[in-house]
Image (tube, grey):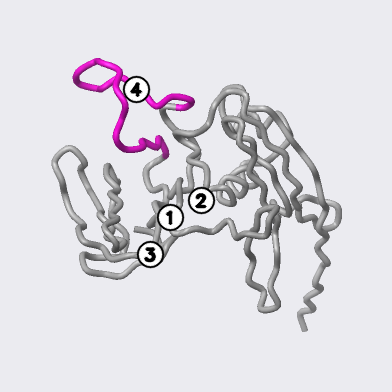
Amino acid sequence: VELVQQREMQSRIHMAGAEIRDSLFGAGAKAGLGNGTILSMATVFGYDIDFAQDLRAGDSFSVVYEDIYRDGERLRSGDILAATFVNQGKRYTAFRYVFEDGRVEYFDADGRPLKKSFLRTPLEFTRISSQFSTGRKHPILGKVRRHAGVDYAAPGGTPIMSAGDGRISFAGWKNGYGRTVIVDHGRGYTTLYGHLSKFGKYKTGARVRQNDMI
């Protein structure tokens, strides 16, 4: 007879904060945050802040978060309980709320949900190009100009999510964009995702929900 003993896990609450000088991950590391907690914080504020184009040196954040332990050993990052992010002088706040059915959502200080129709940063990023600037050097012309899209430098295979609910109007190859997916969100709104390493399971004509991997 094999006996299985379940060991209790503990949740420990921590607080941290930092000012951004070079990158979000660099500031988080100096504050003692793991990458998982930093990504969770970016996800919470991902409806309001584009962490590729909006970050500036001097931005700051503070966060209250859980870490999960077992027998005194840290197992993994837990949830963000509350957070504040100051971006270009504007303060954003987030408070975690658990509904009776177990659903989790975040609200601002006025009780408004943070979740909106479109994500500002629709991927799980680990490193982002063109930080702290809306200009970049054109790879062919050699001139600095505003880039109409947003470039994210991330390892191949990084999940790309639909920024909002919609229908795949195109999934294929486009000159200048390589593998490309276009999502029609209705009311005249579309989003285009280019330079993809591969396609997800959704084909042209398929319906997608916000956060579905495309």
Instruction: Give the SS element for disc 2.
Output: loop
Tell me the residue that label 4 is attached to.
Answer: 136
Do the numbered discs 2 and 1 sit on residues whose CB atoms are within 8 Å?
yes
Residue type beneath disc 3: Asp
Question: Rounded to the nearest whole Å, what is the CA distance between mark 2 and mark 1?
Answer: 6 Å
Q: Which quadrant, please, contains the C terminus? A: bottom left
Is residue 135 inside the magenta stretch?
yes
Tell me the residue that label 1 is attached to.
Answer: 118
Mark toward the viewer: 4 or 2 = 2
Residue 146 in the image: x percent, y percent? 31, 26
Question: Rounded to the nearest whole Å, what is the CA distance between mark 4 and mark 2?
Answer: 24 Å
Do the numbered discs 4 and 2 sit on residues whose CB atoms are within 8 Å?
no
Q: Is residue 189 above or below residue 134?
A: below
Q: Is residue 178 above or below residue 107?
A: above
Residue 125 in the image: x percent, y percent? 48, 42
**Residue at the extreme top:** 142
Please tell me which residue is depicted at 30% across the width and 18% down the height of the picture: 144
- Which mark, by number, is residue 165? 3
Q: Earlier in the sequence, mark 2 or mark 1?
A: 2
Residues drawn in magenta? 131-154
Residue type beneath disc 2: Tyr
Please tell me which residue is depicted at 27% across the width and 60% down the height of the picture: 184
Residue type beneath disc 1: Phe
- Nearer to me, 176 or 106: 106
Q: Earlier in the sequence, mark 3 or mark 1?
A: 1
- Nearer to me, 180 or 155: 180
